[in-house]
């Protein structure tokens, strides 16, 4: 087991609560995918959400990002109650999500994906046309600022490798997410090298003061990157730990239920 | 997965560098869909050959072949008068095909375009028969067609019914309604404005051709230079991704069907002007040709990739084909057969673009 940065994990982080979810429930027909989704994310930290397949992680994430409206439960952002029923509402609150499927349109170019729904326009009065040049230039800056190398913003996403696509989706979230970035298994589909790069990117975001909620079922990765961990089992949030002083075996036990929370 | 060299990657500039190409889908390069996209810089020769935009080229190549063949067969084909005739005759189909393109770009299909046009024409005719001004009659025709578009859009986007079924239903409903409204009889429409629309123009360019050009240019600007256009292509490319990114996909899809309806209404005005009457005829060939023009134009039926110029050239090609066959003296009965062969050939060519 390794740690990311001794100064970061030596003591529990002291940031205030940015996002608090309590008792979120979500059913699809007769299937209760989420029975008690609870998580607290402190400002400026990387918080991990772990659990087995089907534990409800992705459903909880989709409730936080406005893709699903929770049936019940409480969501506080900066201490104020919020309710997201559409992705744009979460976006407006500064929460961006790197979905497991990345939510990129393959037929569009990199810059089009980065600016979709935030298009820059120029023109007079109500007659607005897309400012393509500006968007291309700024998209290239976005990519450059995170030191990810995507082969040109005019490339269609279809032409990019898995790691490059992941990078585009992360760049988009990091750029527009003014308060928080949620990443749903950002390395699940990646190879060893690409995983290392994405992990470096996540550390970089944290260095910049962004708050990250990381969904993963790679416990080693969680211990490397996160400050705190929330554990889900069978649709419920069952445990909360600081990664400092927690071992991989502890996490395995919590996820499987061998260790009761 | 195990820890991968985590400390060395710590602060160093994280990069996801990788050479492009070599990955799956690397051949689907600069197809249509991005009006003025720059050619990607890093491309090998092999890549470029494999990535030749066959879908985009099918219609222009086909048109050139037709022109060469028919002008060899008959000297009349490439005369100024005949070119004017072809363009004027293709205007209605161009307008319908542009509307169809918007719907197909959302990965839908509008089977009701021709019936909607018929309904618009009949409503126009009834208003003329009732003695209203021609402006009001035209407006009523377009409005009636727009209503069909709204119904299509709401049923597909909000009702979440398959586009094919919805527009098959409105195809039938609109043509039935046209028969009811017209009581099954054609209504002659003698009007100076429509006569001028059908026979006049600016210099050698007939009014219907100008209307088609304005529609095509406007559609191109909307599709490739507006927020709406980008969101429409995103919706067609991946509805799920677009929705998660905050696009109101239902609204976008509804709008696409409304655009198709309005353009069918505009086509109805051109049709009534051309025929000199509002007929509750079924106009099925316009439906088939509008879809054929879109396919010829290299627009992906899966949505997300489209051009306007492609379907426009496709529509001109189909009209030129009918014109050429008539000039050469081939029976009308062979024309649908020829259209079928051309569309199949285009689809075959398009196969190589992915």
Image (tube, coloured by chain):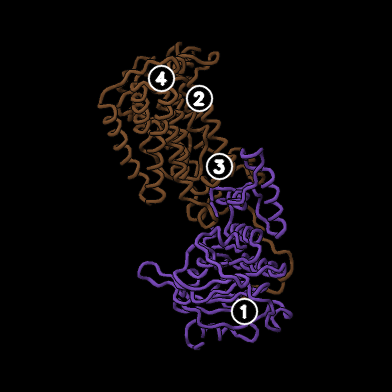
Chain colours: A purple, B brown
Q: Which residue is mark 3?
A: B51
Residue B273: mark: 4
Q: Secondary structure at mark 2?
A: helix
State which tag comes first along the sequence, 4 or 3.
Answer: 3
Q: Quadrant of residue B319?
A: top left
Instruction: Between residue B266 and residue A98, name the one nearer to us.
Output: B266
Residue A104 image offset from top left, x and y in percent: 55, 55
The residues bearing labels 2 and 4 have C-alpha atoms spaced at a distance of 13 Å
**Quick check: do tags 4 and 3 share a chain?**
yes
Q: Which residue is mark 1?
A: A228
Q: Residue at x 68, y 56 (%)?
A: A149
Q: Quadrant of the N terminus of chain B?
A: bottom right
Residue B87 vertical position relative to residue B139 in the rendered view, above or below: above
The residues bearing labels 1 and 2 have C-alpha atoms spaced at a distance of 64 Å
Residue B21 in view of the camera: no
The residues bearing labels 4 and 3 have C-alpha atoms spaced at a distance of 44 Å
Q: Secondary structure at mark 4?
A: helix
Say whether marks 1 and 3 touch (CB < 8 Å): no
Q: Which residue is mark 2?
A: B211
Q: Quadrant of residue A249?
A: bottom right
Residue B25 image offset from top left, x and y in percent: 53, 50
Mark 3 or mark 2: which is in front? Answer: 2
Could you tell me which chain the residue with mark 1 belongs to?
Answer: A
Residue B128 image offset from top left, x and y in percent: 36, 22
Residue A251 vertical position relative to residue B256 in the rendered view, above or below: below
The residues bearing labels 3 and 2 have C-alpha atoms spaced at a distance of 35 Å
């Amino acid at each position: 087991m390794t740690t990311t940065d001794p100064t970061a994990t030596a003591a529990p982080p002291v940031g205030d609560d940015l996002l608090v979810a309590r008792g979120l429930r979500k059913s699809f027909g007769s299937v209760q995918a989420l029975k008690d989704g609870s998580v607290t994310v402190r400002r400026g930290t990387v918080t991990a959400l772990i659990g087995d397949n089907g534990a409800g992680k992705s459903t909880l994430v989709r409730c936080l990002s406005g893709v699903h409206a929770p049936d019940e439960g409480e969501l506080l952002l900066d201490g104020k109650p919020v309710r997201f029923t559409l992705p744009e509402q979460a976006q407006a609150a500064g929460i961006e999500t790197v979905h497991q499927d990345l939510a990129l349109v393959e037929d569009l170019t990199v810059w089009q994906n980065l600016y979709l729904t935030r298009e820059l326009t120029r023109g007079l009065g109500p007659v607005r046309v897309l400012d393509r040049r500006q968007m291309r230039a700024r998209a290239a800056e976005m990519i450059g600022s995170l030191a990810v190398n995507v082969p040109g913003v005019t490339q269609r996403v279809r032409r990019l490798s898995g790691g490059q696509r992941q990078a585009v989706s992360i760049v988009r979230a990091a750029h527009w997410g003014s308060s928080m970035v949620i990443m749903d298994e950002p390395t699940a589909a990646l190879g060893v090298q690409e995983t290392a790069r994405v992990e470096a990117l996540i550390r970089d975001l944290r260095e910049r003061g962004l708050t990250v909620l990381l969904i993963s079922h790679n416990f080693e990765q969680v211990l490397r990157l996160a400050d705190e961990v929330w554990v889900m089992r069978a649709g419920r949030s069952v445990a909360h730990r600081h990664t400092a002083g927690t071992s991989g075996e502890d996490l395995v036990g919590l996820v499987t239920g061998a260790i009761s929370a | 997965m195990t820890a991968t060299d985590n400390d060395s990657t710590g602060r160093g500039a994280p990069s996801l560098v990788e050479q492009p190409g070599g990955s799956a889908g690397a051949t689907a390069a600069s197809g249509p869909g991005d009006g003025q996209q720059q050619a990607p810089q890093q491309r090998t020769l092999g890549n470029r050959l494999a990535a030749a935009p066959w879908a985009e080229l099918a219609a222009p190549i086909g048109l050139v072949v037709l022109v060469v063949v028919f002008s060899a067969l008959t000297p009349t084909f490439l005369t100024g008068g005949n070119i004017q005739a072809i363009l004027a005759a293709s205007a209605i189909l161009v307008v319908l095909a542009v509307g169809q393109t918007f719907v197909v770009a959302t990965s839908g299909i509008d089977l009701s375009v021709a019936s909607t046009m018929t309904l618009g024409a009949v409503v126009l005719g009834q208003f003329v028969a009732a003695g209203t001004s021609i402006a009001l009659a035209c407006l009523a025709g377009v409005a009636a067609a727009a209503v069909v578009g709204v119904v299509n859009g709401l049923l597909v986007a909000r009702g979440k019914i398959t586009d094919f079924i919805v527009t098959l239903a409105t195809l039938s409903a609109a043509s039935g309604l046209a028969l009811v409204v017209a009581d099954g009889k054609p209504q002659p429409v003698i009007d100076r404005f429509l006569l001028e629309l059908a026979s006049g123009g600016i210099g050698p360019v007939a009014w219907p051709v100008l209307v088609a050009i304005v529609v095509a240019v406007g559609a191109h600007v909307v599709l490739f230079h507006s927020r709406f256009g980008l969101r429409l292509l995103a919706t067609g490319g991946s509805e799920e991704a677009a929705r998660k990114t905050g696009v109101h996909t239902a609204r976008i899809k509804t709008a696409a069907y409304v655009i198709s309806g309005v353009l069918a209404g505009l086509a109805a005005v051109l049709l009534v002007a051309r025929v000199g009457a509002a007929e509750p005829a079924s106009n099925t060939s316009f439906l088939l040709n509008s879809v054929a023009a879109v396919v010829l134009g290299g627009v992906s039926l899966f949505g997300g990739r489209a051009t306007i110029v492609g379907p426009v050239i496709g529509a001109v090609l189909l009209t030129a084909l009918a014109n050429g066959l008539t000039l050469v003296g081939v029976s009308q009965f062979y024309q649908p057969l020829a259209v079928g062969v051309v569309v199949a050939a285009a689809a075959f060519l398009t196969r190589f673009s992915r």
